[in-house]
Image: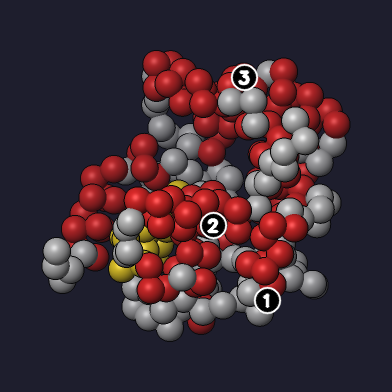
Amino acid sequence: SSTPRSGQTTALAQDAIDLLDHLGIAKVVLVGHDWGARAAYLIAALWPARVERLVAMSVGYETGIKPGHEIPVEQIHAYWYQWFFHSERGREALQNNRRAFCHYIWHLWSPTWQFDEATFERTAASWDNPDWVEVVLHSYRFRWGAAAPDPRYAALEARLTPQPTISVPTTVLHGELDGASLVASSEGKEHYFSGPYARRVLPGVGHYVPREAPNTIIATLTNLTADLTD
């Protein structure tokens, strides 16, 4: 198809805002994991009036790779799949062997999570979406400057430099054993938040915080929204 398939975080953020507008929802408590957290950060930064509270999981707040930005060697190693996806062989692996590839990733990123095959298959069905591979590849390639941006989001992208401050009360939850975005990657972000900010490292938890620590998320949301009224 000639229809653009954008994996830019600005595209995800704009989609969420468009959905809220369509549903007539003025303000929300945002909870996001990984790509969802990246989009939630942008929504809180660019549309703060739409967000009551923010809970972000497994990634710290980052709007792009700055010139001269140094990535720790350990994180370079953990992001091997992102570099692989820059190659044609990476595209072929994702296109032709997506279930085996992602099954391995699940174990790698959450080494203590004992998921069953039924759980995996329920999720894997979504990867059969015909847009999935192209969106995944564009996301990682654009993130590292190897793919052209979607011009529809140029105005939003321009607002991300310099990185905007978030005023929305925010809690970050990051698994200690995360094998994708290492736990150190979410450290030292306090200066990007002008409102209340807290970061919690979850012992014994890997990348998939919503799956591995659902009760922690519920407790966090309960505490974070205790002062909100209908």
Pick whichever, 122 or 3, lies toward us: 3
Q: Quadrant of the N terminus?
A: top right
Mark carried by residue 14:
2
Amino acid found under the numbered disc labelled 1 = Thr
**Whether residue 191 is situated above or below residue 132 in the rendered picture:** below
Of tags 2 and 1, the one toward the viewer is: 2
Q: Left or right: 192 with respect to 202?
A: right
Mark carried by residue 100:
3
Mark carried by residue 15:
none
Q: Tell which circle, 2 or 3, labels the residue nearer the N-terminal end.
A: 2
Q: Tell which circle, 2 or 1, labels the residue nearer the N-terminal end.
A: 2
Residue indicated by mark 1: 161
In this picture the colour scheme is: secondary structure
Q: Is any atom of residue 176 visible in this view?
A: no
User: Which residue: 77% across, 35% down?
Assistant: 2
Q: Determine the CA span between mark 2 and mark 1.
A: 17 Å
Q: Position of residue 79 (x, y in %)?
A: 68, 46
Few, some or many residues within 10 Å of mark 2 (<14, 14–19, 20+)? some
Few, some or many residues within 10 Å of mark 3 (<14, 14–19, 20+)? few
Amino acid found under the numbered disc labelled 2 = Gln
Question: To which quarter of the image does residue 96 belong?
Answer: top right
